[in-house]
Amino acid sequence: MSEALVNFLQQLVNGLQLGSIYALIALGYTMVYGIIRLINFAHGDVYMVGAFIGFFVAGWLGEAAIIPALLLAMIGAALLGVTIERLAYRPLRSAPRLAALTTAIGISLLLENLVRLYVGPNFLAYPEMIKRVNHYFGGVLISNVYMIVFGTAIVLMAGLQYIVVKTKAGKAMRAVAFDKDAARLMGINVDGIISLTFALGSALAAAAGILVGITYGRIDPYMGIIPGLKAFVAAVIGGIGSIPGAMVGGLVMGIAEQMVVGYISSSLRDAVAFFLLIIILLIKPTGLFAEFTQEKV
């Protein structure tokens, strides 16, 4: 293959790996918004907390404990998400949306500073849970870490799609998203479904945190800010409230970012997210997968 084609394919591979992480985080945004119309800006910091849970579990069980670290991080983040919903968001469910949005920003700052107080403000080296082995396919570098990250993300996203589409809990989630009052009249525990939504979204964010730690080898208390914003943009691009849209939006975001890094400048990698957002909103304001809906008044 030509050098130009190899470079393009390399950036594409890197973009798919990065985009799968954005997609996992974006799913939490889109699920919560679909259920209670709330932009949970603390979600990026739940992703950060999940990465730190994995960090401490690996220190406790040993660096090779990737599966226990992943499971415990997802469980811990799910409990954190449910706690945040129960204590911070549920009392404000009937309040103006600005009150809940302000609370979400406050929770974000609280999580960042609590973790900073405990571990300090500096980067921490992430345990090498997977021994990196590089493979070359026609000159394109694909490491075993990239394969595991991308494969894990795809399995988790497929699992979420199965839960939402095929299970009783998923049907209840869709009913609550469509009409909470009607769902309550049909005997659905709306509060329980909302808590389940936070738990699932937070668990996926924690998995993304573990995958980022494995890939890039370092974490810090503020690691959730920029990826959280990019994942939110990915959710909006895909059509916030749409699970397939969040998946596609995350992949588009990751590929676009890597193409900019590879062909233009790495200093523009953060700007491309918001440039994409502007373009998509100008062309299709509801996002790629969402449809116009009427607001009930």
Image (cartoon, grey):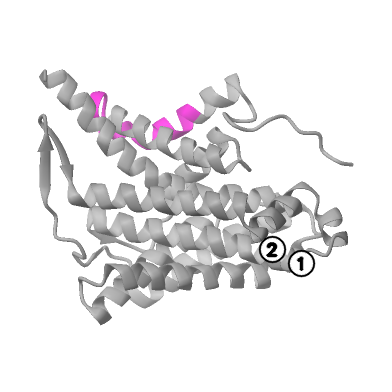
Q: Please tell me whether residue 112 is drawn above or below residue 34 in the rendered image.
A: below
Identify the residue shown where x is 64% and y is 30%: 286
Q: Where is residue 62 in the image (x, y as percent from the top left)?
A: 21, 77
For disc 1, the marked residue is 189
Whether 274 is among the magenta residues is yes
Identify the residue shown where x is 11% and y is 29%: 138
Q: Please tell me whether residue 138 is drawn above or below residue 222 in the rendered image.
A: above
The reply to whether residue 212 is visible in this rendering is yes
Q: Please tell me whether residue 110 is drawn above or below residue 270 in the rendered image.
A: below
- Badge 2: residue crowd in 10 Å (few <14, some 14–19, many ≥20): many
Please state, as top left, top right, bottom left or bottom right, where the N terminus lies in the image. top left
Q: Label 2 is placed on what type of residue?
A: Ile
Give the alpha-carbon distance from disc 2 to disc 1, as whole Å: 6 Å
> What secondary structure prevails in the magenta region?
helix
Q: Which of 78 and 281 is in front in this view?
A: 78
Q: Where is residue 114 in the image (x, y as percent from the top left)?
A: 45, 73
Q: Position of residue 210 (x, y in %)?
A: 34, 61
The reply to whether residue 223 is visible in this rendering is no
Answer left or right for 83 relative to 92.
left
Answer left or right for 236 relative to 98.
left
Q: Is mark 2 on a helix, strand or loop?
A: helix
Q: Nearer the viewer, residue 139 or 43?
A: 139
Q: What stretch is highlighted in magenta?
A: 262-276
Identify the residue shown where x is 31% and y is 76%: 57
For disc 2, the marked residue is 193
Q: What element carries label 1?
A: loop
Check whether the beta carbons of the residues at disc 2 and disc 1 lie within 8 A of each other.
yes
Answer left or right for 122 relative to 158.
left
